[in-house]
Image (spheres, grey):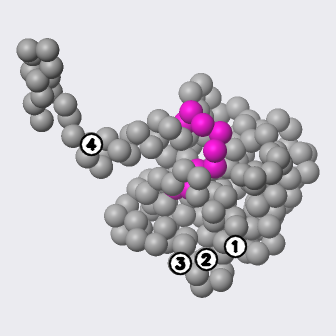
Amino acid sequence: MDVMKEDRRSRIEPFGPARLHSLDMAVARRTSLPVLISAPAEFALPMAIEIAGGPAGDGAGIVFVDGAAHRDASWTLDRAAAAELGPLRAIVVQDVDALDRTQQSALKALVADPAGPVARPCRIIATTSVPLFERVTQGSFDSDLFYRLNRIHIKGDAHLSHGC
């Protein structure tokens, strides 16, 4: 699109999906708010790693939790809630939709309530390849946890956009 500015023509690029996505990523890297990424696993995990690295781009203080590995997920989330993992900058939860109710409660303890004090000085980045809001309406995912995680929502695929 061409616009006139002080007798000169300037070119303004329209905001397409790729541009909006890069803006979402830039905001997510620079904030401490929880991030929910709805995308196929092959796209979601690299995005989560990039966001968790933050502006510094290093991997120090980042813990990864695989929601599908139920025993390991419980152990890691419990240790993080008890501050037994040392100083954490971020916890990346892959396949957050696979967490059972007990694990969801442990994760909710780590995600700051927007109206309350911060429970743990680290951020949560969660990924899902299914429409998580549908899981909430079905009663298999905690609605409060969903809304706490959904502070910044990056949608990586059009088929997930409905209901996330």
Tag 1 near tag 2, CB within 8 Å? yes
Find the distance from the CA under tag 3 to the CA under tag 2: 5 Å
Q: Earlier in the sequence, mark 1 or mark 2?
A: 2
Quarter-of-image position of residue 10 = top left
x, y (%) of residue 82?
91, 51
The foreground one among 80 and 115 is 115
**Residue 94 seen:** no
Q: Say the numbered circle drawn on residue 136.
A: 2
How many residues crowd around disc 1 within 10 Å: few (fewer than 14), some, or many (20 or more)? many
- Amino acid at pointer 3: Glu
Q: Is residue 161 above or below residue 22?
A: below
Instruction: Please state the total of marks drawn on the protein image.
Output: 4
x, y (%) of residue 162?
40, 71
x, y (%) of residue 145?
69, 64
Q: Say the numbered circle drawn on residue 15.
A: 4
| Residue at the spot 85% in from the left edge and 43% down from the top edge | 85
- Amino acid at pointer 4: Phe
| Residue at the spot 66% in from the left edge and 72% down from the top edge | 143
Quarter-of-image position of residue 161 = bottom left
Residue carrying label 1: 142
Q: Earlier in the sequence, mark 3 or mark 1?
A: 3
On screen, residue 83 versus residue 49, left or right, reads right
* Residue bounds of the magenta highlight: 29-37
Secondary element under disc 4, as helix, strand or loop, is loop
Residue carrying label 3: 134
- Amino acid at pointer 2: Val
The foreground one among 21 and 42 is 21
Secondary element under disc 2, as helix, strand or loop, is helix
Tag 3 near tag 2, CB within 8 Å? yes
